[in-house]
Amino acid sequence: MTEVENLPERSVLVARALEGLGATGRVRALPASTRTAAEAAAALDCEVGAIANSLVFMADGRPLLVMTSGGHRVHVGRLAERLGRDEIRRATPEEVRAATGQAIGGVAPIGHPAPVETVVDVALADHPTLWAAGGTPNTIFPLTYAELVRITGGAETAVD
């Protein structure tokens, strides 16, 4: 079992989900906030592009988790077209918490109360190691692009 006794409750859920999915990375707490991609990259001494941002949108009224490179912005119009959706908009903080059980700035790609449709930005494949939020603003875990796609069941697409 992963050592979870010092992790926040939300991160314990993520750690257990990772373990159950056979992921190799382990959730760890950092002393500084990793709420933004820039903060996470600075804390980890890595490129901003290696941060796998978890952004929640509402796509035709349903939650959509977009895992994007910290160096990219999501172009909702193009993404809606690629996914065949009429409208994609940023989720409110309340919608994010309802869909994921987690707060903005700490949303993990897994560990949600129910599965959330996920899109994985193909730009993340450019980095051998990615870092994703672990359920709170200062927990994080490493993984590969292939592992991210596998554990989320995400559709691979460009999001910018």
Image (tube, rainbow, N blue to C red):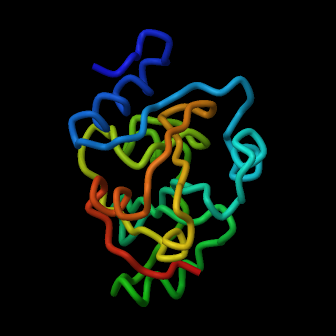
Q: Quadrant of residue 16?
A: top left
The residue positioned farthest toward the top in the image shown: 5
Q: Quadrant of the N terminus?
A: top left
Task: Indicate the position of residue 17 as horizontal and vertical percent values.
Answer: 28, 35
- At a point 52% along the width and 62% down the height, the residue shown is 128
- At a point 53% along the width and 42% down the height, the residue shown is 133
Task: Indicate the position of residue 75 as horizontal and vertical percent values.
Answer: 59, 79
Tell which of 67 and 25 is nearer to you. Answer: 25
Q: Is residue 80 left or right of residue 149?
A: right
The number of callouts visible is 0
Task: Indicate the position of residue 141 as horizontal and vertical percent values.
Answer: 50, 39
Task: Indicate the position of residue 81 as horizontal and vertical percent values.
Answer: 43, 90
* 119 to 76, vertically: above or below: above
- At a point 36% along the width and 83% down the height, the residue shown is 83
* 91 to 110, vertically: above or below: below
Q: Quadrant of residue 44?
A: top right
* 82 to 59, vertically: above or below: below
Tell which of 44 and 75 is nearer to you. Answer: 44
Q: Quadrant of the C terminus?
A: bottom right
